[in-house]
Amino acid sequence: EEMLEERRLFYVGITRSMDRLYLVCAQNRSLYGYPEPVDASRFLDDIPHDLIEDARFSRSSPHPRRTPLHRSTKWSTAVDNTPVTKSAYQQKFHPGMQVQHPTWGDGMVLNSRIDDGDEVVDIFFKELG
């Protein structure tokens, strides 16, 4: 019954979108300060494949790369054995900074932090919220 309610809420969220719907999932979340892997929603498999465009961010580029969606319940990451210099941990984005994304338009940086060597940025996009 709990899963039916979860599915219902997922459906309600999808049907409220007017034109486009962006579904996002982090690879990890922080639990008591430690990164924990995250599985994508089990209900994503219910969405017809022809309605989905997958846009993923690489670590080196702020632009999404478009790839066919491979449905999987697990995330995989490439291992990079390149030594990390201290400058790699410097933040490039700061709260209040204006940014522009080719797909999502103009936005403003709300928060930026370094997490496990990667910069994680929260952005408010004027067109999306």
Image (cartoon, rainbow, N blue to C red):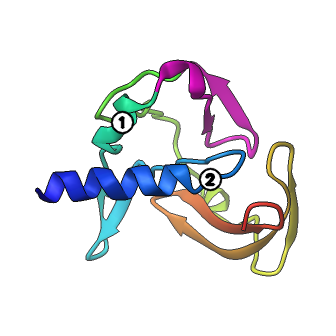
Q: Secondary structure at mark 2?
A: loop
Decide whether residue 65 is among the magenta residues: yes
Indicate the quadrant containing the N terminus: top left, top right, bottom left or bottom right: bottom left
> What is the residue that sits farthest to the bottom in this orientation?
96
**Residue 113 coordinates in the image, percent (x, y):** 58, 72
In-image side of 112 versus 48 (left or right): right
How many neighbours does mark 2 have within 10 angstroms: few (below 14), some (14-19), or many (20 or more)?
A: few
Say whether residue 37 is visible.
Answer: no
* Residue nearer the viewer, 44 or 86: 44
In-image side of 101 versus 60 (left or right): right
Point out which mark residue 107 bears: none
Residue at mark 1: 75
Residue at mark 2: 17
In-image side of 53 versus 19 (left or right): left
Amino acid on which disc 2 is placed: Ser
User: Residue drawn 52% across and 43% down?
Assistant: 83
